[in-house]
Image (tube, rainbow, N blue to C red):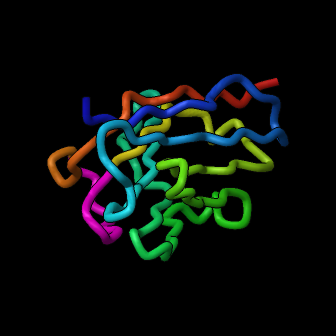
Amino acid sequence: QLQLVESGGGLVQPGGSLRLSCAASGFTLDYYAITWFRQAPGKEREGVSCISSGDDTIYWVDSVKGRFTISRDNAKNTVYLQMNSLKPEDTAVYYCAAARYYCSGRVGRYEYDYWGQGTQVTVSS
């Protein structure tokens, strides 16, 4: 079965850290750009960060720059989002999505070949 599976979400106190994983099953991530999205209750989905097939990275949300780091391990067929110094406003469901080669920044579901099911991140004391 061709799919992406996210993991690593949970409840964390402000200032804490989490590492999200996006693992591919049934296909290789070598030729795919992976984008991390998030969607908070009552808000639209937003693109957070992306890593291209050539390991170029981009962060679209100013508030996560310097706190979040995206990386990939092709040997494990997995992309990671390391999130440090978490804030309550980072609370959301985080999704990963795969598209061929490049980071487009588009948010439409049909722009991507594969989506994960999402993992909840809650930052609260």
> From which residue to which does the magenta span run?
98-108
Q: Quadrant of the N terminus?
A: top left
Q: Position of residue 25 (x, y in %)?
A: 36, 37
| Vertical position of residue 107 compared to residue 13: above or below | below
Q: Quadrant of residue 24?
A: top left
**Residue toward you, 36 or 27:** 27
Q: Is residue 45 magenta?
A: no
Q: Give the x, y percent position of residue 57.
A: 51, 72
When the figure is inspected, residue 59 is found, relative to residue 40, above or below; the finding is below
Q: Which quarter of the rendering shows the C terminus?
A: top right
Left or right for 19, reference 5: right
Horizontal side of residue 120 vs 86, given as left or right: left
Residue at 71% in and 23% down:
11
How many numbered marks have been drawn onto this rendered protein structure? 0
Q: How far across and how far down the image is residue 52, in percent?
A: 41, 69
Q: Position of residue 40 (x, y in %)?
A: 48, 34
Seen from this angle, which residue lies furthest left? 110
Magenta segment, prevailing SS (helix, strand or loop):
loop
- Residue drawn at x 37%, y 28% as measured from the top left: 117
Is 30 left or right of 38, judged from the image as shown? left
Seen from this angle, which residue lies furthest front? 75
